[in-house]
C-alpha cells in the first residue's frame, strides 16, 4: 500500500485557481491521498464555488463528478466516520477560517487537522494557483521513500503559461543576508538544496513531529525556508525531484507593498533564527535595505519605500507576526 498523503491547499479569494488545482489533483495516478482545502476567510464566492465543484455543477469539474464535502470550522473537530467509507477521489475536506491568518497559520490548521484525523504519513503543501502532472506525487513519494534521512522533497516548478520552461527547483540561502541563490536549473538529476518552496513541498510526518509546524511569526515569505532549515539541523535531507512536475501561475506584476514589507522584515527573522553570530549581518542588511528604501522613494514608489523602512524596524526590533500595512 502506498503511503497516505494529505494534500493541503490554502485558498484566499482565489476560487478559480483553487478549482483548477483541485481538478488536476483529481486526475493524478496516486491512489492514497486526502485533499484539504483551508479557506482563509475569503470574502468572495469561494465557499459557494467549492460547494458547486463538489456537487459536480462547476465548469471546472469537467466530468461533473460528485464529491462528498466534509466541512469544518476548527482544526480539532472530529472527522465524520463516513469519510473513510469513500475513496480518495470521492471526498473533500473544507476547513473555514474566520479571517486571513496568513500562509503559515493557515497551512498549520490543515496540518494539525490532518495529523489528528487522517494519520497521514506525509503532508503536501500545494499552492492553489498550481496545476499538477498526473505522476507528480508518485515521483515525490517514491524518491522520499528511498532513505529515512530524506525528510522533505519538492517538484520542478514550471511556468503555467510556458509549460516547457522550468521556473525554479528550490533554493540555497545565505544566512548572513537571507539572499537566495538558484542552483543550475538542471532538470535531469535530483539535487540536495537548503529548501524547496512551499508552493509544492512534501514533508514526512515524522519530520513535522520533530521540528514542529510552520513558524507563524513569518506570516508570509521565508516560512518554507525556515521549515527546511530546521529539518536539516536535525539531520534530514531536502531534495528537488526532477521527475515530478507542477505548473505555477507565477505573476510578473509589480511587487506589492505587502511583499516588500514581509520579504524584507522576514529576512531578519530567518537570520536571527538560523545564525549564531548575526551582528555584522544585521548591519549589512540594514545598510542594503535602507539604500533600497531610498531608491524606491526617489523613483516614485513611496509606499513601497516606507514599507521597507517599517520592515527594517520591525525586523531588528523583533515585531513579527501579522501586521496591517
Image (cartoon, grey):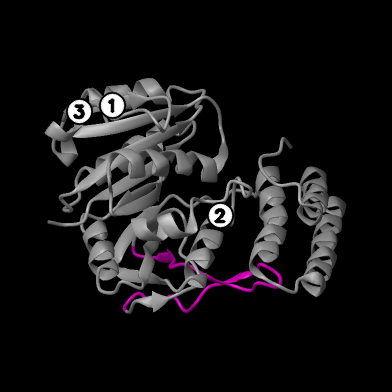
Report the quarter where the C terminus lies.
Answer: top right
Task: Tell me, yes or no, if residue 162 can be seen here.
Answer: no
Residue 186 on the magenta segment: yes
Task: Tell me, yes or no, if residue 269 can be seen here.
Answer: yes
Residue at numbered disc 2: 223
Identify the mark at residue 70; answer none if there is no mark: 1
Residue drawn at x 41%, y 41% is: 112
Sequence-wise first label, 3 or 2: 3
Residue 183 on the magenta segment: yes
x, y (%) of residue 251? 52, 50
Which type of secondary structure does the marked residue at label 2 adopt?
helix
Mark closer to the observer (1, 3): 3
**In this picture, is 170 found above or below 121?**
below
Q: Which residues are magenta?
A: 164-188
In terms of depth relative to the viewer, which is nearer, 25 or 276?
Answer: 276
Residue drawn at x 70%, y 63% is: 272
Question: Alpha-carbon distance for marks 3 and 2?
Answer: 34 Å
Left of 195 or right of it: where is 132? left
Question: Alpha-carbon distance for marks 1 and 3?
Answer: 11 Å
Residue at numbered disc 3: 81
Quadrant in which residue 202 is drawn: bottom left
Mark 1 in CB contact with mark 3 (< 8 angstroms): no
Amino acid at each position: 500500500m502506498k503511503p497516505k498523503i494529505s494534500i493541503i491547499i490554502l485558498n484566499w479569494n482565489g476560487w478559480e485557481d483553487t478549482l483548477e488545482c483541485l481538478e488536476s489533483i483529481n486526475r493524478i495516478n496516486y491512489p492514497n491521498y486526502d485533499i484539504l482545502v483551508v479557506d482563509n476567510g475569503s470574502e468572495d464566492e469561494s465557499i459557494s464555488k467549492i460547494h458547486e465543484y463538489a456537487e459536480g455543477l462547476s465548469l471546472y469539474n469537467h466530468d461533473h463528478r460528485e464529491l462528498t464535502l466534509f466541512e469544518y470550522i476548527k482544526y480539532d473537530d472530529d472527522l465524520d466516520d463516513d469519510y473513510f467509507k469513500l475513496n480518495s477521489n470521492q471526498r473533500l475536506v473544507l476547513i473555514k477560517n474566520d479571517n486571513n491568518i496568513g500562509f503559515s497559520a493557515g497551512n498549520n490548521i490543515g496540518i494539525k487537522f490532518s495529523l489528528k484525523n487522517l494519520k497521514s504519513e506525509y503532508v503536501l503543501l500545494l499552492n492553489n494557483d498550481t496545476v499538477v502532472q498526473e505522476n507528480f506525487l508518485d515521483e515525490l513519494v517514491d524518491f522520499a521513500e528511498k532513505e529515512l534521512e530524506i525528510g522533505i522533497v519538492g517538484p520542478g516548478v514550471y511556468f503555467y503559461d510556458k509549460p516547457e520552461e522550468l521556473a525554479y527547483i528550490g533554493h540555497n540561502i545565505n544566512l548572513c543576508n537571507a539572499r537566495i541563490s538558484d542552483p543550475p536549473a538542471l532538470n535531469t538529476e535530483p539535487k540536495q538544496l537548503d529548501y524547496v518552496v512551499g508552493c509544492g513541498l512534501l514533508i514526512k510526518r515524522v519530520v513535522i513531529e520533530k521540528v514542529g509546524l510552520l513558524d507563524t511569526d513569518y506570516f508570509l515569505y521565508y516560512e518554507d525556508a525556515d521549515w527546511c532549515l530546521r529539518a536539516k539541523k536535525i539531520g534530514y535531507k531536502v531534495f528537488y525531484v526532477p521527475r515530478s512536475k507542477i505548473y505555477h501561475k507565477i505573476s510578473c506584476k509589480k511587487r506589492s507593498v505587502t511583499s516588500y514589507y514581509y520579504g524584507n522584515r522576514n529576512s531578519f527573522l530567518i537570520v536571527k533564527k538560523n545564525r549564531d553570530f548575526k551582528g555584522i549581518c544585521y548591519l549589512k542588511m540594514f545598510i542594503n535595505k535602507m539604500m533600497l528604501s531610498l531608491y524606491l522613494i526617489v523613483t516614485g514608489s513611496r509606499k513601497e519605500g516606507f514599507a521597507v523602512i517599517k520592515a527594517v524596524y520591525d525586523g531588528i526590533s523583533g515585531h513579527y507576526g501579522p501586521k496591517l500595512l
